[in-house]
Image (cartoon, helix red, strand yellow):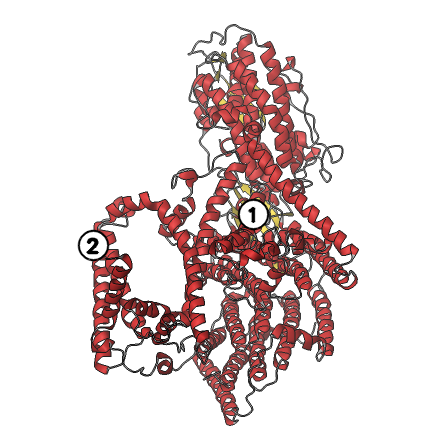
Amino acid sequence: MTGSNRLSIVAAVLVWLARAGPVWARGPRGPGPADWIGIELEAVMFYLLGGLAAVCAVGCVLSSRVVRMALFLFGALGAVAGLYLLLHANFLAAIQLIVYAGGTLVVIIFGIMLSSASAAARYRARPAEKAAGAAVGLLLLAGLVTAVGRIDWSEGIAAAPSAPTVDGLGRALLTTYLVPFELSSVLLLAVMIGAAWLAGSGRK
Amino acid sequence: MTAMPDAMFTSEPDLLFDAARDGPDGLRTEEMLINMGPQHPSTHGVLRVLLRTDGEMVVEAVPHIGYLHRCAEKIGENLQPYQFIPKTDRMDYLAAMNNNHVFSLAVERLLGVEVPERAAYIRVIMAELNRIASHLVAFGTYGLDMGAFTAVLYAFREREYILDLFEAACGARLTYSYITIGGVTFDLPERFIERLAEFLDYFEPKIDEYDRLLSYNHIFVKRTAGVGVISAEDAIAWGLTGPCLRASGVRWDLRRCLPYEIYDRFEFDIPVGRPGGGGIPRGVVVGDCWNRYFVRMQEMRESVRILRQCIAAIPAGEVRAKVPKNVRLPADEVYFEGENPRGQLGFLVVGDGSPIPWRVKARGPCFCNLSITSHVCRGVLLADVPAIIGSIDIVLGEVDR
Amino acid sequence: MTEFTAQDVIRPRWSPALRARAIRRFMLAGLIIMIGTGVAAVCLEIFGRSLSPLWLTVGIVLPSVLAFGALFVVFAITAHALLGRLLKRLAFVLFIGSLAGIVLTAWGASLLFGLVDRIVAARPDPIAQTIFGGELTTDEIVRFFAATPEDPKALEAPPALEFVAYLLWPWQFRLLRDLVLALVILGFVSVTASFAIWWERKVAGRIQSRLGPMRVGGWHGWAQGIADGLKLVQKEDIVPGRADGPVFRLAPYLVFIPVLTAFLALPFSDRWVLRDLEVGLVLVLGLLGIDVIGVILAGWASHNKWSMYGALRVAAQMVSYEIPMGMALLLPVMAAGTLRPGAIGALQSGGFHTWLAFCSPFLFAAAGVYFVASLAACKRAPFDLPEAESELTGGFHTEYSGFRWAVFFFGEYAAMFVVCGLAVLLFLGAWHSPLPASWGESLAGGSWWQRGLYALLFSGPAWFIAKTYALLFVHIWLRWTLPRIRIDQVMYACVQVMLPMTMLLLLGQMFWQLLVPPDGITARAANIVCTLAGAAIVAAFVGTAGWGYLNRRRLVGPLAVNHLPGS
Amino acid sequence: MGSITLMHYLVLGALLFCCGLLTMVVKRNAVGILIGVELVLNAANVNLVAFGRYRGAGIDGQAAALFVIVLAAAEAAVAIAIFMNFYRHLTTVDVDRGDLLRG
């Protein structure tokens, strides 16, 4: 008996084990797993990332320590970056990570440095205040969701743009959006000078 | 640590806890109290430095000592002098030979004992070898304080060989009790002088290697030049001795200025701190950390010079004067100071006619040198504190005694 | 009330009682999973659902594997003494086997992917791959193999082929592919970290004229990294009493996971890359920025003033050095005109002189600036202020111990690999050898050994990894040579030296690209000069290192050599 | 593109917006208020990008979002500078204490 024969017998036994009996019988293909599960990566990822963003946003409202709040903010921003990826805005996702990683960092630092002493006088809300806040927030949310839900968004859905976003974005910034682009650079310069002056205005 | 004395700080004694004050740019900042030590890598033992910091700036640094206090002086008043010699080993345990030497000399002056010629040479050899070993440790650990990890391994590699020589002479590698009252305990073993010469030939080029590795390293110079400057007046006023004093530009070395033993027979220079330029890196100021470090490097070369002269001139003969074990100390007092690697070690021995001294008092160089820490560590950066403490080169065994 | 004795403190944690309990639990788990599998099989039978391979995998095969795994653990615990001896003897074999396994897994997986892709492409109506929605059936796979152009009737497939079809079927799902590749990357990072730990200690030893680890594993202590890891995993995980527990526990993962994710876009060669994203470079930079947040939170949550210092230092340092680092990265991006790592790498295939660092003097300088900035971004000496031992007693990780501390260091070594990999990718020819790839074109499409030769000689992941490790060596070398810089000097060097320098370089490169024609005499001369300078640096480095190694005994000196064991 | 529609993103954006707004209202720490503002801006960004993708606006949504990110960075820089001044005067960043109406 040759080696390959022996191998094929072993394989056959394995296949038979895997397909023995009526259950394993190869019938006509029933509803496939894809149809049965009925969800795709996009939906799974949306619910995962959106859920993370929502939880983190709620955490921002509820936590009382600044550093925790900044951590929640970072979680929400990271989740939103993931959502940008889902929306095929790759460049925006990467920029979100870079800018907000640095931004959150600075917020954490200032949170630590500016509120260490006043943390002793931490504000404790009364239950009534909490309830009022929650009610206002929920009302606002309900209103917004109703407003969004009233409009039928299904019309006019365009084909997914598959053009490379970095290229397109770069071209758009230097053509269509040239004026805002330049304005924003001027704004950044002004902000830099202004912030430096404000922060150093106590200097004698 | 429960109750901190009010007099802990020289300024604002009532502010024991984090205190707000106006910073240099008008922003009200909060100071932080932070304990450097007693368990800290760069306090070289169990020193605790209480820092009051304003961000990275150190507003005030107060050393707290005493974690290693072992009543050495009190023990000295209950033992005969030759019994006390092992206790001197444990004071500055990196320079035990020098401690033995100074205490023996003090007691010999009290008793009026004359040391044989060969014993005097052996003593100088041991003292200078131990000076090199001690400076090697200072060099290596200073590298560690600065974040250069390699220097310490090189330093300990060479120090091992010195310890081998000591081991051959007396059987111990750290606490020797080799130099004793009236001379040394044993004569030198066979081939000791040859091995010593071999070591010196090997060691001298290594100092250039250390200079290339660390002394003239750009980052190292940037970290130490102009940091922790001690003026000559301050150094004298605070009682600094040894390399710390010489780095401030004061040419004071007891081996030359008040020669003891046979130091007047040797030719050697007293290295002092020098300003930048002419081979010295730019930015270096007399009395800064770099000079304190570099004076030690040069002293190693000088010690090698002395050792070579010793090898050339060592005579044969007795190694120990006849001193009876139960000798009665005369009712007199003697204070003797010798030049140790870290500065002047002084012993006050008072006899009252009995074999046990009435009073033994040590003047430790590390203790006095350390006292200037709080004066220098004012308004420096946090990273400069290890640089300054390391450059003062303390051994807590002697600070606390 | 029982008396508390010293025995309670020093009692080994692996006591017989514990052992018996572990055996019981694992047996129980295995049995429960087995019963669950049986019930699942019966349920499927009752409901008459025909069994697709996915259900077979998820419902029957995976639980069976789990159950057998649990039972194997029971066996391992029971035969612990025997296995321990075996493991010790087979350690080297296992390690090499795992290395080979990682490579083979990646290679085999890509082979399988390619096969499945071919089958999918051969369909009359090609389908898009989705996560769950593969529409390929096993029949199609069988038919693909059985049907040759000459013999299209061969539908009666031999059973072995059907088995192969079942094996191939799952690979049409991207989720599975990504999972396998993620495992490969995790394995690679683990091997890199454990190798780098050993290597760092060996290099440190050589630099300090000692031997370094020599015991664990036999040959030159090769298993030291693994042993360190095992030790750290076994140590107690301490959370300080007044620390912010959740944040303290989270922080190491915030350091490690972003760096691991950065491997997503890091190409090891034109084909060995998980996702060749068009924004790959920006993404890697962003991910490297995130691990700073983990470090800061670690320092803050430790409730230790030294850790706090470390955290604030790391914040200042990272925020500053990310700017020169990112701007230095912009130069090759400008030269290449793309952010896609694969495209940048493909540009540099024409040999040593086409590597981007040698294309213009500005790029040459930018390579140096980037390397210094990347040292700072990895918190490596001489920029290791956040964890400065002699000042901050360890800085942000003072309070960490055991596994979490190990995670920090895995993250650090992985980050070192990523920044060095970026330098190699952007400046030093990515995965190409110094020889022009065009010389080996005839090999590239040949048989398997010709392709292997091509990968070894001209371009392949081996070159990328080798060059990255060469830069990693420079990181290690600097760490054991240079003293540490002070915080004000760090900030000065960044804000007043490197930032203006990178701005000027950026400006210069811009004008260079605008004004200097790429085939003109200036460009060629600059290329030649930079290439020669680069070659001189490499030659000087290799020459010095080789000379030092050959003369190591004489350089150390006779006395120290006589002290070495065996001399 | 399957089950996830523009509606989903808009609802998520609304949620983020509400949380951001609540954070701004509830917190008395100035840094907390800044965090709320960032959340609100991000909610807007999610909507912009989602509209850009689902309503065929092409690259416009992303460009607008990019400008929002730039503005958010600028706003944070100025805000933190103001907080520093605030802290300098009042030794706190509790905004309820900032009712002096003088320098």
**Whole-percent x and y of residue A143?**
50, 90
**Whole-percent x and y of residue C49?**
27, 81
- For marks 2 and 1, give the CA distance: 49 Å
**Whole-percent x and y of residue C452?**
49, 54
Q: Measured along the vertical axis of the image, is residue A204 above or below residue B151?
A: below
First along the sequence among labels 2 and 1: 2
Pointer 2 residue: C20
Evaluate whether label 2 is on the same chain as label 1.
yes
Mark 2 or 1: in front is 1
Give whichever of A45, C107 is nearer the camera. Answer: C107
Q: Residue furthest front?
A: C150
Q: Secondary structure at mark 2?
A: helix
Asked whether the viewer can see residue C393, the reply is yes
Instruction: Give, as a three-letter code, the residue at label 1.
Output: Ala
Q: Measured along the vertical axis of the image, is residue C69 above or below residue A156?
A: above
Q: Is residue C168 left or right of C305 when viewed as pictured? A: left
Q: Residue at x 38, y 48 (%)?
A: C231
Q: Secondary structure at mark 1?
A: helix
**Whole-percent x and y of residue C253?**
46, 61
Instruction: Give, as a three-letter code, the residue at label 2.
Output: Ala
Asked whether the viewer can see residue A114, the reply is no
Q: Quadrant of residue C442?
A: bottom right
Q: Is residue C115 left or right of B336 when viewed as pictured? A: left
Pointer 1 residue: C470
Residue B259: image tag: none
Q: Measured along the vertical axis of the image, is residue C526 above or below residue C169?
A: above
Local packing at callout 1 (Cα closer than 10 Å; few below 14, some 14-19, many 20+) is: some
Q: Chain of mark 2?
A: C
Local packing at callout 2 (Cα closer than 10 Å; few below 14, some 14-19, many 20+) is: few
Q: Quadrant of residue D34?
A: bottom right
- Assess whether mark 1 and mark 2 are in contact (beta carbons under 8 angstroms): no
Give whichever of C121, A91 is nearer the camera. Answer: C121
